[in-house]
Image: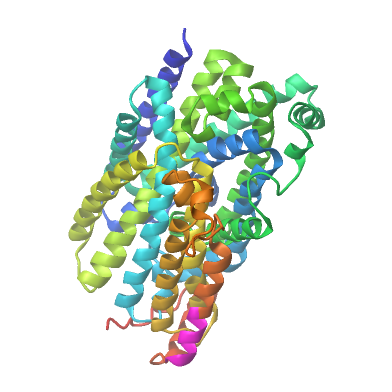
Amino acid sequence: MGSNAISIGFFFAFMALTLLITYWAARRTRTTEHFFAAGGEVTPWQNGWALAGDFLSAGALLGIAGIVTSNGFDGMIYSIGWLVGWPIILFLIVEPLRNVGRFTFADVVAYRLRQRPVRVAAAVGTLAVILFYLIAQMVATGSLIKLLFGLSYSWSVVLVGSVMLVYVLFGGMLATTWVQVVKAALLMAGGVLLAFLVLTHFDMNPLKLFAAASQKYGAKVLQPGSRVVSGQWDAVSLGLGLMFGTAAMPHVLMRAYTVRDAKAARLSILYATGLIGFFHLMVFIIGFGAMVLVGPEAVTKAGGGGNMAAPLLALAVGGNAFFGFICAVAFATMLAVVAGLTLSGVATLCHDVWTNVVRNGTASETEQLKVARIATVLISLLAVVLGVAFEGQNVAFMAGLAFSVACAANFPSLVLAITWRRFTTSAAVASILVGTLSSLLLIVLSPTIQVDVLGKSLAQVENAWWFVSLRNPAIICMPLSFLVAIVVSLLTTETNADATFAAMQERILFGNAQPVPARQD
């Protein structure tokens, strides 16, 4: 049997299982609490696996493996940056989030401030992050489906968008949770088996694998800072974006609301951190394995921006059947992450914008669910259009840009809302908007867009007055966002700031205080 036939078989098996999950979840999703937070009934271990499934994206399995294959050790900056953000979530973010919020991170930022301006600004930042990350997932999924079915790239992206729409539209968070759990289990199994098969070619000794890579492609593949990033500042900027962006990704933070209390949320993060760290060790082996056993040239020739390293390695070490399994796992990976991202965007539009801004908190459950499903369709359509437009970009790199926007737009306002009494509504709005807009502007003026997307040569743009040499703007935009928040807070005041901050701290610590009556002006 050919590899495509096996891949398609695994693909349809996964589809059948997840559609059954969606049907089961749809019968239990009748309220916004269930649609956005699974009724708070998910256990810590389930949520830990779901968090791993939500976070371990196409950028982990395909993108990082591809970057390591092409560039060696440098590619691990993505793994390390993404992983070290999780202790920040564990120790600083998750308990206040679970005790104060309901569905989105904007619930926490707006808790003691004026609801409307803060939620509108938060929606702008959240949607920018989600769309960047969605682009990364759609590009990878389109490339894989094109390889699997022989469809055109555009129709492949349309197919993925349609499946994503079904998951979220009918199953909500409950279906998304179990799809992510199943996907995480498959991903762990596939990653461990692929790394094991690679090591069998090197006497089960990773050092022999690295030595073979060095002998074949030179010592630079084992040296940090020489291939992926263009300099020290670029490396620091990328690291900041990945680390603090992880702690501010809306679809990750949203999962804090699916468990019963803050203790369960902390346990969820602990389990997820262990799973994610272990998997990234496997990706390191997979990337170098593809470098030695497949070759960067073959990976590049396969297309997809270098994202086919892991599937091609599976074909080389495990034959058609294992290639089919890894392709199906990669597809499951992307669908699970895309579903989580879509649901987070829907929560922003429905809960933050429609319910709390447009309807001033008066929307009925039926109305909110109707708006949520309309928003699901709109985000799915937008994801398809953007996925087609960004064909060929490396998914880990595109995901890194999403994290840069998150660390500048969301992280400063979230941390200051939790910790600083003087933080004001005007400061929150200014910080979020400056972080979002400065990130987007610097990305547009960087080689990321000017060279990689628009196709200009570096020589054409590097001497232009507006050109920004940093590929990742986090080192500029995150401090700028913090600075704006602090300055504006010192220049403005907030009504009843002491009382509302004290009430919020009580709720953060004990989780049982009454909500502060939010100001709607």
Tell me, yes or no, whether the highlighted magenta stretch contains residue 487.
yes
360 shown above or below 375: below
Residue 475: image location, x then y, percent: 58, 65
- Lateral position of residue 22 relative to residue 415, left or right: left
Query: Foreground residue, 446 or 184?
Result: 446
402 shown above or below 304: below
Image quadrant assignment for residue 37: bottom left
Query: Foreground residue, 216 or 21?
Result: 216
304 shown above or below 113: above
- Lateral position of residue 58 relative to residue 152, left or right: right
Residue 84: image location, x then y, percent: 64, 56
Query: Mainly helix, strand or loop, the magenta region?
Result: helix
Image quadrant assignment for residue 106: bottom left
Q: Give, as a single range, the part of the protein colored magenta.
A: 484-492
Q: Residue at x 61, y 45 (%)?
A: 276
Tell me, yes or no, whether the highlighted magenta stretch contains residue 259.
no
Asked whether the viewer can see residue 365, the reply is: yes
Residue 332: image location, x then y, percent: 45, 33
Residue 273: image location, x then y, percent: 62, 51
Q: Residue at x 47, y 73 (%)?
A: 413
Asked whether the viewer can see residue 28, the reply is: no
Q: Quick one: quadrant of the C terminus?
A: bottom left
